[in-house]
DNA sequence: CTTATCTCAGCTCTACTGACATAG
DNA sequence: CCTATGTCAGTAAAGCTGAGATAA
């Protein structure tokens, strides 16, 4: 697929001890490992989170899904749009709050999620091939904890001063 | 900086157990945590790898650096270009092999790398705040091993069939 | 002739930002 | 009036691909 995955890449020591660097690298490798597989199934990275979220929570508004996944609402538009086009979800106005787009997973979408999961599992097995089962669990636990602990100093809800103008 | 870092984001269980997903998420969080800091120091993510590589190996050609970092040579052009403009590196033709651009780290570049390191260390301390020192070491070790084990099935050196045409 | 290095142009995807209409 | 939701437009960085010029 790409020429970067192979070849003698031994990053300098300074980089090899930087968590942020290694994280980016690992994420990129994981992405490379999954992207080709997902492409074969006709799915893209970004879809997975949305489908999985809907599968768990049932219907939800775009904003809610975005908040769950940490995706900007403006970016949700295109993602949901694609999923609608593929018939994986249905977008309809919420009768309670007519600002909201209520998103519902279709059967086709659920099936797609299944194909997704299958391919990702296989890719993950490759990625974590030389990890023992215990290490794998530890690794995932650590990533989860990292995720949880990654709260930034100032929560601030984007003020957006409308005061002027 | 962004509205996505805060807010109630608890990803669904299916996602929370997917290493590839958590990796992407963690990498994004790490990126968010460092990006703002680096911006203040006038540096961008991509610069760091190049500077660190040069700091360790001394002068190198663009292709070599790219190979070390897993970055496509075509992308190195712009990165090195920026670094040259900022005065962090010098680009000159290699007298031995005149295809090569020999890249050398300047004093200013070394200083920039220092500022970089400082900010990244701080960001990393935040990111790994609720990790013990031992866990931190384990985590980094695992990421390193992942990196090393992430060789894809077919090494293939980009054939690029010039046979036809 | 083949390969390696560098470069350019173009594309996708992710992410972020600002602005705006509309609903609450 | 202010906030929340969805939308659009534009930007930026990273990554990938194809093509080509030049040097080895």
Image (cartoon, coloured by chain):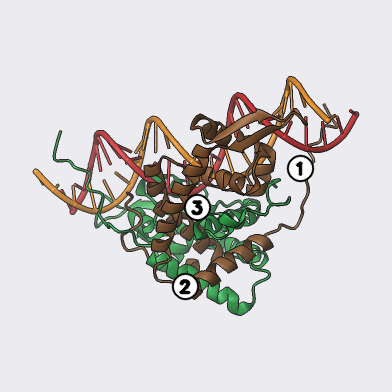
Chain colours: A brown, B green, C orange, D red
Using the image as rendered, state which of residue A24 and residue D13 is in the foreground.
Answer: A24
The answer, for residue A82, to whether it is visible in the render is: yes
**What residue is disc 3 on?**
B46
The answer, for residue A75, to whether it is visible in the render is: no
**What residue is disc 2 on?**
A133
Chain of the residue on which disc 2 is drawn? A
Which mark is nearer the camera, 1 or 2? 2
Where A73 falls versus B133 (above or below)?
above
Q: Residue at x 57, y 35 (%)?
A: A80
* Crowdedness near tag 1: few (<14), some (14–19) or many (≥20) residues, C-alpha within 10 Å: few
Image side of residue A33 versus residue A92, left or right:
left
Residue sticking out furthest to the front: A107
Badges 3 and 1: C-beta atoms under 8 Å apart?
A: no
* Crowdedness near tag 3: few (<14), some (14–19) or many (≥20) residues, C-alpha within 10 Å: few
Find residue B15 and name its label.
none
Where A95 falls versus C21 (above or below)?
below
Q: Residue at x 49, y 74 (%)?
A: A135
Image coords of residue A64 (percent x, y)? 69, 42
Chain of the residue on which disc 1 is drawn? A
């Amino acid at each position: 697929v790409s020429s970067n995955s192979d070849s003698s890449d031994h990053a300098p020591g300074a980089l090899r001890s930087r968590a942020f660097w290694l994280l980016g690298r690992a994420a990129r490798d994981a992405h490379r490992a999954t992207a080709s597989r997902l492409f074969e199934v006709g799915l893209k990275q970004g879809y997975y989170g949305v489908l999985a979220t809907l599968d768990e929570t049932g219907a939800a508004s775009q904003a809610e899904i975005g908040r769950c996944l940490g995706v900007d609402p403006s970016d949700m538009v295109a993602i949901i749009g694609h999923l609608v086009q593929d018939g994986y979800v249905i977008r309809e106005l919420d009768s309670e709050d007519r600002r909201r787009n209520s998103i519902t997973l279709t059967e086709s979408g659920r099936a797609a999620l299944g194909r997704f999961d299958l391919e990702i599992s296989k890719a993950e097995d490759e990625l974590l091939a030389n990890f023992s089962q215990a290490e794998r669990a530890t690794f995932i636990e650590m990533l989860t904890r990292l995720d949880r602990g990654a709260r930034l100093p100032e929560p601030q809800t984007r003020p957006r001063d409308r005061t002027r103008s």
